[in-house]
Image: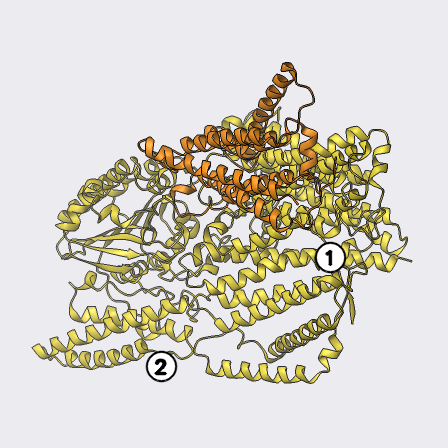
Chain colours: A yellow, B orange
Amino acid sequence: MRVRSSFFASFCLVLEVLSVALFLRGFFPVPVKSSYSSKSKLSPNLSKVPDPLFKRVVIVLIDALREDFVFGPNGRKYMPYTRHLVERGSTHSFVAKARPPTVTMPRIKALTTGSIPGFIDVVMNLNSPALLEDNLIWQAKTAGKRMVFYGDDTWVKLFPKHFMEYDGTTSFFVSDYTEVDNNVTRHLDSTLKRDDWDLLILHYLGLDHIGHISGPHSSLIQPKLMEMDDILKKIHGSLILKELSRRTGALPYLLVLCGDHGMSETGSHGGSSAHEVNTPLVLISPAFKRKGKHFQQVDLTPTLALGLGLPISQNSVGRLIQPVVEEASLRDQLRFLHLNGHQLSCLLKDSMPAYEKEEGYEQFRVAEKSHGNWLKLVVEGNTSEVLNNMGKKVLKQYLEALRVMSAALSKQMGKYDMYSMVVGVVLVFQLLLLLLLAMPEALSGASEVDLPVSSALLSLPFYLLCLLLFSVHMLVCTSAESACYFCSLPWGLVFGAVALSSALLCILVSMAARKGTKPPGKSPSRASGGGWSLSELDILLLAGTAGHTLSLAASSFVEEEHQVWYFLLNTLCLVVFQDVCRKYFRERSANIGVIGCSEDEDCLPPSKEGYAVASPLTDFGVTGADSERWLALATPLLTLACCRLLRSLNQTGVQWVHLPDLGHWLNSSEHKTVLSLLAAMSLALIYFLVQRRCSWVSKIALALGLLGVYSYRAAVGNVMLPWQHSGGNMSKGTMKARFVYVFILGIFFTGSKDLLRSQVITADARLKSRGLWEIYSGVVLLVALLFRAHNLPVLCCCLLVQSLMAQFIWKKLHYDAAQTTIMHYWFGQAFFYFQGNSNSIATVDISVGFVGLESYVEAPAVFLTALSTYAGPLLWASHLICYLSSENRSSVAVGHGCYCLALLRSVPAAAYVVLVTALRYHLFIWSVFSPKLLYESMHTLLTAAICLFFTTMEQSRSSSRP
Amino acid sequence: MWGEEIRHMASSHAIMASGVFMATVVPAVLVPGFSVYGTHLLWQYSVAGVVAVVNISLFWLLGVSPPTKKHTITYKVSRLVRSCLYLLLSCLFFHTVVVLYGAPLLESALETFSLAVLLTSLTTLRCVCVLGPNVQAWIRVFSRHGAMSVWDTSLQMVVGCSVVGAWLGAFPIPLDWDRPWQVWPVSCSLGGVIGYLTGLVVAPAWIHWHRKHLTYKSK
């Protein structure tokens, strides 16, 4: 079966996206969720919760409070009062282990729900502001507790309308570390005097900001911690005063000091090093004797819930911190433990198919039974010493059962579904091999791939393989212990996957065999090697692609991937510059006659069949050749200068992200005029660069649209208009954004109309290239609307480089489709990072999802966010198709480009999938490698969509060709 | 065919390599507190200086550089001035390229410039010595099939190896190993020098190996 290479490439890429999706499903553990309807009471027979132990709880959460700030050798210097309390007072102090990702919002969720937010959960909930899961705050609210909150406004977003009184401070300006905390403390005196609250939560951000600015050994740390210590002293003092005045018999208070996460030696957080994970947890209450131990951070949730007399949140995997309740009567203690155990066993039932075999569950059953017996004896009025010992034994059984169940649940969260992952990897690799084996044919002049599909499907090995794989599937699924996604798929889908895999294997084998039997040297193609010498540019392009793929194995190179791309891009520009120099200076010396003309032919890339090749010498005969030569020489240099400027616009990555960059400088309020001028100039230049090849209708729409973009930015308050002086009224600019959307749709409409006309009515290549260009300009306008004001120069430089390179380099130096595609891909990658992206989830700009929308609507918000994040690769890919299908290009160029794009995306994606599987127990798997995996899969999805567009474009060409 | 020239080249390259070696060892003995990482600038300058002195004296002694047409003093002086000018320009060129590659523009400009000086002494200086201050000849040698003698080929290889070495030297910088040699510009200059040494070793060996296939066009 002969298929066109573009169709073949997009087919492979689409299948690859599906396999990667299967892999992702296996890789990211599904968060354990209780199946009970959300936020219902814990269970009917235990509906009555025991009485609370504490009347009033104050939680002082200090962001990035590291364990050694309190308990370490410096603790006495940093927080004298707290240390004094820990050593003398009636406190319990623990080291609470936070789970990675050690970022504030997931930590707050963990502290309140008691569950461990899975990584995928963090990503999915990036947009949804309110926490819908069962949590402590919600339970407290329904129980009628009055809560007061001051601090980081993440809480206010997570729990809207839960607090009786609140004041949120944003952690937006990291450089401010005094004001954020003063905003919290200023309410403290009045609140502490009052008596109308039950739960007071304070979240201090200053320490975290200091960590980000200057690290954990900075001189700013000590004064900040002293300040925190004073605050704790003040709260404790006022609580003691209240305690003295309370009536006897009333319940005591509880003061909790904790950190949400620690900070690493460089002052950042998010990873899983010991310094980031270990946080102090100090519980202060007159009801305590003292003790100290290691606990999980999530253990605070059931403890607080039971202490306040609330039901435990359903998805909590924490266990009761027993020392906290040890002053209660044995009967109450057992009751608390039973409640906790019951909740954990319910969760266990929902998350594991074979929960009855689980050790902890059995232990819990045993403990429950002996608890029942014990209770019976107690009710009968038996009060002997034996009974007390028996109760102690039950307590121990409970504690052990809780420990085992909690550990099993936590382990469940980190378990990989290896079978699905392996199936995904195998499919991805088969597709990659298929793409690689088809390379000589796909890049040949005919641009068609001969796939032996029918012979493979009718062969005996295919059916045998199907049977074999299917039986393996049955075997794996019946013997699997934990839940497996691939096994839970319907039979039809599984059979499809099995048939696909075996068919691919058969096709691969027969293609390889065909290649082996074919006499060598028969297929003349580039990159097949035989007798064809690689130029420096080819060496760079191949080595760069391979080197980048290899570099993904190192976590630092994943974090600093932008450096790799900038570096490669610079080298590319220099090599292109050398090519240009060689071409133009060689011409001159050729004219002089020092070197024979025969060598000139070597200089040009050899595969130029089908091009309208103009002899290089004729370019020089025409007038104006001199200025053109200088422009051609200047283009790579200008590109280099642009790249250097853009590089300092947005600092990304991890190691050098703290360095000051132009973006921050522009965004500060005193440079608003500069930013406005820059944005206006960029928009003007964008118009100038894009309008050249549009029809007049789109020209007008584009101009109005770009004006709309500026007025939208002015309305949002990023830039200013000369006649608008009061910057007070900041609106959302919804109307203006919608105004721009109308023009974008208009441009898309005219573009697709041109495309359809060129396809259906007249086979006019010029009309088609105009239609493509109009679609491209629509994309540009959309990106201009979505980009932040300081990023508009990125767009502008992108267009500038594109038009210059197209005019003076790619056309003039006769680079073939494959080389051009690889260059486009590299530029696209570099621009992805120029616009401020990185390989961590944190740099995704979610605010883009609200452009032109009144409120959060999921589908458009996700679409817009993805579009603006991948604007760089998208713009370069759409420029590629415009360039390749412009009139005087060879007819197979689009097919070649599509194939190369698919191959360029498959190689790193396949390599990365294997890498992640191999490194799944790496320390940085959740902080570094997983976000990159998501980025890679998203990019593959985008490339698949682009390749499909390529295919339709090529199809229309071949069908319209007479 | 060129047995004598290859022997000359091998011995002169050995002298250059030992020069680089001495430039590292001798200051370590003489100067207290000298180390390649710690006092990196000093090391760079000592290597650059020794390479310059050894190159100039060796090529002058060997008489590789093209014969001058005129023997007037003014002509020689103008050649000398032009050579110096080219070296300075090459320093600036390397500095610009390194900044374009992402070196900080203002801070550690001295380090960047000394790297440029080192690279100039490793590459451009040899060009000046072998080819003279003649841009046309440089362009000829560095375009494909432009070599016209064994020395041209060795020049190509040594310069290529040095530049590629410095290029590869930049790769370890983003790694988070916190080693002293990852500090800018230690790894790049080390890479450059290692590349240079590799080039010195490889060039005569390669020419000796391929002496049957090498043909040079006469002028």
- Relative placement, left or right, of B199 versus B50 is right
Could you say where residue A593 lies in the image, as x and y percent from the top left? 81, 34
Residue A28 seen in the figure: no
Q: Which residue is mark 2?
A: A357
Q: Is residue A129 left or right of residue B134?
A: left
Q: Are marks 2 and 1 on the same chain?
A: yes
Residue A941 falls in which quadrant of the image? bottom right
**Total number of numbered labels?**
2
Q: Which residue is identified by label 1?
A: A531
Residue A831 image-quadrant placement:
top right
Q: Quadrant of the C terminus of chain A?
A: bottom right
Residue A66 drawn at (x, y percent): 29, 48
Q: Residue A73, image x and y in percent?
A: 20, 46
Quarter of the image for residue A395 reads: bottom left
What element does badge 1 sit on? Answer: loop
Left or right of residue A810, residue A724 in this image: left
User: Where does the image place residue B177, in percent across and percent down from the top left?
Assistant: 40, 48
Tell which of A68 and A322 is nearer to you.
A68
N-terminal label among 2 and 1? 2
Q: Chain of mark 1?
A: A
- Mark 2, Cα crowd under 10 Å, few <14 / some 14-19 / many 20+, is few
Give whichever of A592, A315 is nearer the camera: A592
Q: Is residue A629 above or below residue B187?
A: above
